Image: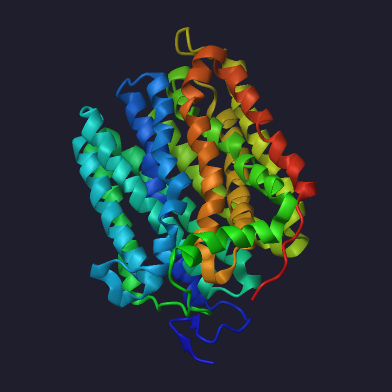
Amino acid sequence: MTVTSGVRTDGAVGKASAATLAVIAVYGFSSGIPNLMLTSVVRTWTTTAQWSIETIGLLSLLTLPYAIKFLWAPLVDHVRPPFCAALGQRRSWLCAGHLVAAAMLVGGCMIGPGNALPFLALFALAAIASATIDIAASAYQIDVLPRESLGKGAGLFVSGYRVAWAGLGLVLLSAAPQWGWPAAASAACALVAVGALVTVWAAEPPRREQPAHGVRAALVEPLALFASQWGTRLPILMLFVLTFKLPDQVGNAMIEPLLLKGLGHSLQDLALVRQGFGFAVTVLGAIAGGWLVGQIGLKRCLWIFGILQALSNAGFLWLAWKQGASISGATAAPTSLSALTAVILVESLAGGMVSAGFVAALMSLCERRVAATQYALLTALMAVGGAIGGSVSGLLLRHLDYGPFFGWSVLLGVPGLLCIPLLRPRASHA
């Protein structure tokens, strides 16, 4: 056996090295920045720019590329971008994706929401590049990690992701009032390029089996493998993947309008409590989630994490009713920071644990030689729910008001929980 930059090159079962796990954590960070911009920041920025609730809800469609990335996922398994081809199959896409995402995000931030069409167009292109990063980064983990280390790798990836989403978000929201949104957001987005630098340093993971070429090998075979492995239980798997994270996806789309418009909190409150305090708790949640998967099993963890996820949305329901926040009335008095902190504690802990457990679950279902395509298909189902549910969240909020909206979002998690006992472990594969 040989080891290069911490990567096992014989494909044997064993522990992942510290260098390998560090690379995965950095990829989590660089992947988290586009997600931060395309979800939390774009909603916060446009809320302060007085965009309507309905339009802010439609911004969830920016995540649609994550849902349809299976369309180009076979390219990540079979083709290399010409200008990065020398880096190898996985690293070529990681390098290209990071560079394009950084360029599109910085350009969009410099334009700003005052010029809505080019602003949204560049962010949409960044979303495509970001989805490509996710495909390649997930396949990289599957290629380089032994199966028993997938939970640990997922936990570190999500931790890096949350460092970007929460930690960098804190800095950005704190700096925006002083620097201005374009300068603060552009500086944050430039950090996406860190992923390209790490890619040049990291070793290309070994391909345990070289994939065959052609449409059948690229797309038909991954689908056929799923069909043969799950048979009549395939709809149960699809329903689980589609709905398990739905409470988080739908509820999150309206958290910024609730806190900023409904409850009158400041950007500083969001920075300190949701981004700062939430950052520490989410990282702990992700690490704890990855550890728990290895200790008590994936299925038990999914029950625990899913219930916590529902409770996190119930916290925002409590805040809205406690302060009498209404979409049609005057802005309510901000809730106390202690109450807001308690709600964010549950939300962040649940978010980190759910992400780590869910990512580990999806990765465990993928055949290594077609990992990019199969993982993309699974995460596409999850993203479809998030994009569609988030896009109508503004309309639902306008119709239901804050309290009932977050109450209904809790119930959206029931179908995913009911699927857990019906899931069966797939046949093991090399």
Report the front residue among 283 and 26: 26
- The answer, for residue 4, to whether it is visible in the render is yes
Measuring from the top left, give residue 222's x and y in whole percent.
56, 62
Q: Position of residue 154 (x, y in %)?
A: 56, 61
Give the residue furthest to the top. Answer: 329
* Horizontal relation, residue 7 to residue 288: left or right: left
Residue 155 position (above or below residue 168): below
* The image quarter in which residue 335 lies: top right
Residue that extends furthest to the bottom in the rendered view of this protein: 1
Q: Could you tell me which residue is drawn at 45 percent across and 8 percent down? A: 330
How far across and how far down the image is residue 271, in percent?
42, 38
Q: Quadrant of the C terminus?
A: bottom right
Q: Is residue 52 above or below residue 413?
A: above
Q: Nearer the viewer, residue 272 or 371?
A: 371
Q: What is the quadrant of residue 201 in the picture?
A: bottom left
Farthest right residue? 421
Does 254 sit above or below residue 231?
above
Q: Quadrant of the N terminus?
A: bottom right
- Residue at the spot x=33%, y=28% of the render? 46
Left or right, 349 with respect to 331, comes to right
* Percent coordinates x, y for residue 352 in the rendering: 58, 49
The residue nearer to you, when weighing 68 against 30, is 68
Is any atom of residue 138 visible in this view?
no
The residue lying at 49 percent from left, 25 percent from top is 392
Count the marks: 0
